[in-house]
Image: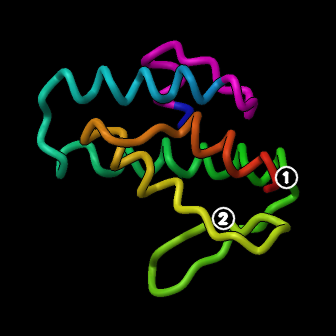
Amino acid sequence: MAALREGARLRLDYSAQSLWRVDRVIDGIRREDAPYAAVETVLRGLGAYAGEVIVRQTGAEWWSSGGDHWVRTPDGKLWDPMEEARRRYTGDGSLRLLCREATAGG
């Protein structure tokens, strides 16, 4: 993430608002038309960042099994920010909206 912050001059402060910028970065990567395999690691990193935002905002915990990672919020719901980053890359998701839903506590 440090390299991405430096290269893209991306301000990542673990705030929910920073996820708006992360969604835009993913949109830019998609516009570059790079194959998914070439950007998968970056997308996982951006998803992990979004997960950490949720953890810090809600007191959630990271869960993992078989190489997959999720965030479990105090209400018991599991969230998959890495998958949401992939969905954003395909034009169907939003890390900002995922965080908003996860922090709503509903």
Lower sequence index among marks 1 and 2: 1
Residue 62 sits inside the magenta stretch: no
Quadrant of the frame with the C terminus: bottom right
Give how far across and how far down residue 23 sits, in percent: 46, 28
Side (left or right) of 61 relative to 79: right
Residue holding disc 1: 58
| Marks 1 and 2 in Cβ contact (< 8 Å) | no
* Amino acid found under the numbered disc labelled 2: Val
Placement of 67 over or under 52, stated as above or below = below
Q: Is residue 101 above or below residue 24?
A: below
Quarter occupied by residue 75: bottom right
Q: Is residue 98 left or right of residue 59?
A: left
Which region is colored magenta? Answer: 3-17
- How many C-alpha atoms fall within 10 Å of the one at disc 2: few (<14), some, or many (≥20)? many
Q: How is the image coloured?
A: rainbow
Task: Please tell me which residue is depicted at 18% across the width and 47% down the height of the picture.
Answer: 36
Q: Who's the residue at 71% across and 31% down the image? A: 16
Judging depth in this view, the residue of 47 and 105 nearest the camera is: 105
Say whether residue 10 is magenta: yes
**Disc 1, SS:** helix
Sort mark 1 into few (<14), some (14-19) or many (20+) by Cα contacts within 10 Å: some
Q: Which mark is residue 71?
A: 2
Q: Quadrant of residue 74?
A: bottom right
Q: Is residue 91 above or below residue 54?
A: above
**Residue 99, how many percent across, how many down?**
65, 43
Amino acid at pointer 1: Thr
Query: In percent of the image, x 67 and y 46: which residue is there?
Result: 101
User: Where does residue 93 sit, x and y in percent of width and height?
Assistant: 40, 42
Q: Secondary structure at mark 2?
A: strand
